[in-house]
Every structure is written in C-alpha cells, then in structure tokens.
Amino acid sequence: MNLLNLIRDSLASLDMDSTLKHVSEALKHSISIMDIVNSLSEGMRLIGKKYENGEYFIAELTVAVEIFNEAMNILKPKILGGREMKHIGKVIIGTVEGDLHDVGKNLVKTVLEVNGFKVVDLGVDVSPERFVEAVKQYKPDIVGISTLLTSTMINIERIIKALESNGLRDEIKIIIGGAPVTQQFTESIGADAYGENAFKAVEICRKLVGK
Amino acid sequence: MKSRERLLTALRHEEADRVPIDLGSTDVTGVNCLVYRELRRFFSLPSKPIRPLITGGSDPSLFTFYNMVAEVEKEILDTLHIDVISINRTLEPTLDVKKLSKAFINNKWQITEVKFKQWYWGEWDLTIEIPDYIDIVENGDRYIAKLGGREHAVAPRKSFYFDSRRFSTPLKNVKDIAEVKDFNWDSYKISDLVLEDLRRRAEHLYKNTDYGLVYFRLGSIHAWPQDLRGWTQWLSDLRLRRALAEAILDQVMDVVMYNTRRIVDAVGHYVQVIGLADDLGTEESPQISVQIFNDIYKHRYETIFTYIKRYSKSYTFLHSDGAIYPYIKELIDVGLDILNPIQISAKGMDPEKLKKEFGEQLTFWGGSANTQHILPFVEPEGVIEHVRKLIEIFAPGGGYVFAPIHNIQPNTPLENIVAMFKTAYNHGKYPIKQIG
C-alpha cells in the first residue's frame, strides 16, 4: 500500500504512532505536503462516516483531532518559508454572547481546517459588535455561530441583525449550530444553514463556497 | 398520601395517589434564580433577594451557588405541590442551626459557618444571596467569583450562571503517574465537621417533615477527571493515554469511595435518594463507546452503587444529560435505580421506547417537558398537551418522578412553567387517564 493510503487509514483507525511515522516517511520520500494533508483529510472524512454510522463517538473525534494536530506539527515547519497553504474559503467562528462553551465550536473549527478552510476563531461569549468588526476586518465567506444554551440561543438573531444593519449580511453566508438549534429555528432567524454536527457543518460550508 | 411515602411508592415501581413532583431538590432539577424571581411575582409574593441553592461538588465540603438554581421557598413548594427537597437547604424547612462549609479564609482552608450576603447582578436587576466567603468582582465583560482571592468561577455579564470549569484543570499538563499521585487528592475528602452537619440536617428533616429527601452530588467519576484534565483531553486520554487515565481514575475512585462511605453512613438512613452527577452524553450520542464505558466506568459505578445499596435504604440516582441510551442497560446492571434528566430531545431518548425497555427496573426522574425546544417556545395549551402525553407514557406503574429536564431557563414564559406543574398535579393522579 502506498504511504498516502497508510496515512489515511492509520488516522481513520486512530493509530497515532503509525500516522506520525507514515507522515514523517512521506516527507522523507519528498511527497508533497499538499498530498499528505489531503490524505489526512481523507482519513478525517472516513472518521466522519464512522461517526455518522454510530461506530465512533465524540471521544474518537477528539482523538482524531489530536492526531491530526500532531501530524500538522510535523508538517508546518516544512511548509516553505511559511507560505500559506491554499484555502478553499475563509470562515469566522465564535460562540454567542453569554455562552462559554467551546467544545462543539472547536471541533467544527478543526474539521474545517482539515478540509482546507482558513478559520478565524473569535472564541466564546462573542458580542454582535465583535462579529461585525471581525467580518469587516477578515472579510470571510462564512460566519459560523455556536451556542449550547437555549437561553442564549436568541443572541444569534442579534448577531444577524447587527450584520444586516452594518450592510454586511449580503457579503457572507451564516451557518449556525449547537445543542438547541433546529432547522426551523435557523430559518426563523434568517440564517443560511444549520450544521447538525461538525461533519455536516463542513459539508455545508463546502457547498456554500461552491466546492 | 404524604410526600415521602409518595416518593417511596414511585421508587418501588408502584402507583401512589399521584406522580411525585420535584422542583429544586438538586441544582439540575430546578429553576434559574432570574425565572424564580418572576415566578414569585407571578404568585403575587413580595419582591426580595433570591437565594440560590448551595451544593457541594467534587469537593463535598465546599458549598457554592454557581448553577444559580433558586432555593424554592416553602410557599412555592406548597403552591406547586412539590414533594422532594435537598438536605442542603438553608431556608424553611431546615434545621435552624448554622450551616457549615469549607472556605479559604486568612490564607488557609477552614470550616466556617455559611453566612449570606447580597450581590447585585446589574444586567438583570437581580439581587441574590451568596455565601460571604465568595467575592464577585467585575472584570471587563465578565464577573469573576473569587474564593480567598483566587479565581474560582466566571460568568459573562449577559449569562445566567457561573462556570467553574475553566479554573479547574490542575492536571492538564500532567505527563506521568508520579505527578498524578502528587496531586492533593486528600483535599477533596469530606470534612468531619461538614459531615456531622449534613447528618444533623438529614435527621432533622427526616424526623420533622414529610418531604422526600435528596442528597445530590456525591461525586463524579467521568465529569470530575474531565474537569481536572480538560473536557476533550480526558476523552483522548481514555484512548491514547490509558495508563495515565487509569492512574487518575484510581485516585478519583479513592476520593469518591471515601466520600461515599462517609456520606452514606451519615445520611443514608434519612435520605431516600443519593445522587451522582456525570454527564456522559452529547445531543447526538454518548461521549464514548459502550465498550470503553464498560472497560473504564461500569465496574467503578458498580462499586459506588453497591455500597449505597448495601449500607443504606437510599435509592441510587445518576444525572447525565444527553443521548445515553446505550449505557442505560449497563447502568441498570450495576445497580442504578434512578436516571435523570431523560433529555427527550437527544437522539435515542424516545420516552415510549425508554419506558417500554427499562420502565420495570429504572425510575425516570425528569422527562417532563422538552426545555430546549418546546417549553420556552409554545403557548401554554401546547405545554399542557406535551406534558400530559409524557405523563401518560412515563407514569403508569410508578417509577416516575416529575421534574423539569435540567433547570428551567430564563426566557421561558411563566405561564408555561405554571401550566407544566399544574398539568403534573392534575393529570398525574393515578390511575393515569390515557387521553393520547
């Protein structure tokens, strides 16, 4: 089996040591960084499938994220002169005001990065004003808003209104997610899409940027 | 029928005169202080500061209020026909002597009398009563709760409760087992003074009231290491660093079993329910596979539940949010009697399926209304129908205690809350009418 397939499969089976060994070997064999990252993405996609099938759980996703980040730590110094990798889109992501939860948001962030998105993470408890500033500053394709709490979920609508009143709404797509969010709620507040889990969110983001 | 007898009848899986009702016997089956203030207004009670229920956590001697769940006063207990209370109560009915807690005073941990002081949450125009050994300071967009000068919990100004997790990851960078052993585990073992205080309170409430009595937050064997290491890191530990995880769990179990033995021996003959809190689920699925659950946790739960059942008359209670259907059979296997909160909106937590499969062995404590998607958003008529249907599913044959699914949150219309409890009382009378 070639090294790229080994990278993909060892990540998919959550074998940290083998994944890192194969990544290092691939580098020695002058395989391009882009190809290696693509294999890791493939592996992550297989993990997403296993998650959706009920074979993997959030624990397995966090393991996959940890392995992926370790692999990227090996690759990053080799990315020539710090030249940025090509991105398929830019996403700003944050948890709504009043809410400090970030597990779901962080997972979405990593899976987006794995899939070639540039992600700007605004953190937790992010005010509508901060979202507006960030959209002006980073000019993203997509804004992702996360919430765990039913009580703070309504703050998502305030973010959307703030983006509208600043004339920024038409320049971006808005995707929302988190425990209390439903498709119906998404439509009622005028967001563009609802990501039921990290993998669905990424699938939707790819569609939103036409990839 | 009196409340305690009603509760015990339900726990024996028999039909009492009606379904027992809980509001606020734990800090996960209650009502947020802000909503509670409005509820008092709704019932035309005079305005006054709201006192949150104080509870211990991983350290059962240290009482904090961070979940901001109101201590439900006697008038409201009566009005809503509530049957169960916490032995940690500080309002009527309770033992009229000082309550004790651990606190950091004069640069050292000591046991002190809990005295309350007022604190004003400006964003909500809400005055609450908090233990005087906790100070709240403003820091930009946040309020920081400090204990003896050290940051202990944080709340965004526009949130509704405090979160202590981000200050509680002391084992985050631990790499080897020796470092795990060096950690001050003994500081989490319950103090003798606090224990004696709990015993006296439980005895007093047992002898002088008819309420069902609950001791909650005996400990956690998943959520606590998850706090100590970090939420996601612990999940990775279970797979990538199993030896380290096992070493942490051995220490955790040592503490939890010390506290279990002491607390069960002290209050186990007075309280009807002893509860643990361990969040094991997400909205979509359990956090870990059943295989890892069985390898890591099942036998440890068995040790805890077995002790409770062998040395007391209490029933075992576990609070876990989320989609935990695959664990339920395993938990029943090792002695779990009561599951809370039955998050019916999470995947696989279908009320009919749960009652059919586990109703004979397990008491459902919660499952009263979908607090995430229905209770805050529909008209009272919708609440009545929703709650009625759930009672028709869960209540037959007993094994059901009516309680909100987790705490009732701000932005929930008061009419809906009142409709929920009225329906519980009116439609919860046995034999349950099946309207469908």
Image (tube, coloured by chain):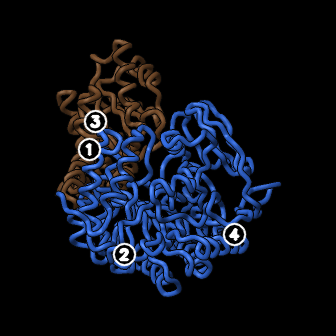
Chain colours: A brown, B blue
Asked if residue B183 can be seen in this view, the reply is no
Give neighbour class at mark 3: few <14, some 14-19, many 20+ (Cα, 10 Å): some
Q: Label 2 is found on which chain of the structure?
A: B
Of the numbered discs 4 and 1, the one sitting upstream in the chain is: 4
Which residue occupies the foreground of this view, B59 or B49?
Answer: B49
Q: Label 3 is found on which chain of the structure?
A: A
Q: Label 1 is found on which chain of the structure?
A: B
Residue B295 is labelled as 2
Query: Residue under circle 4?
Result: B194
Q: Residue at x 58, y 75 (%)?
A: B206
Amino acid marked by disc 1: Gly
Query: Residue under circle 3?
Result: A116
Residue A167 picture quarter: top left
Q: Which residue is farthest bottom? A: B310
Residue B236 picture quarter: bottom left
Task: Please state the horizontal and vertical placement of residue A55, each as a whole percent of the image.
Answer: 22, 62
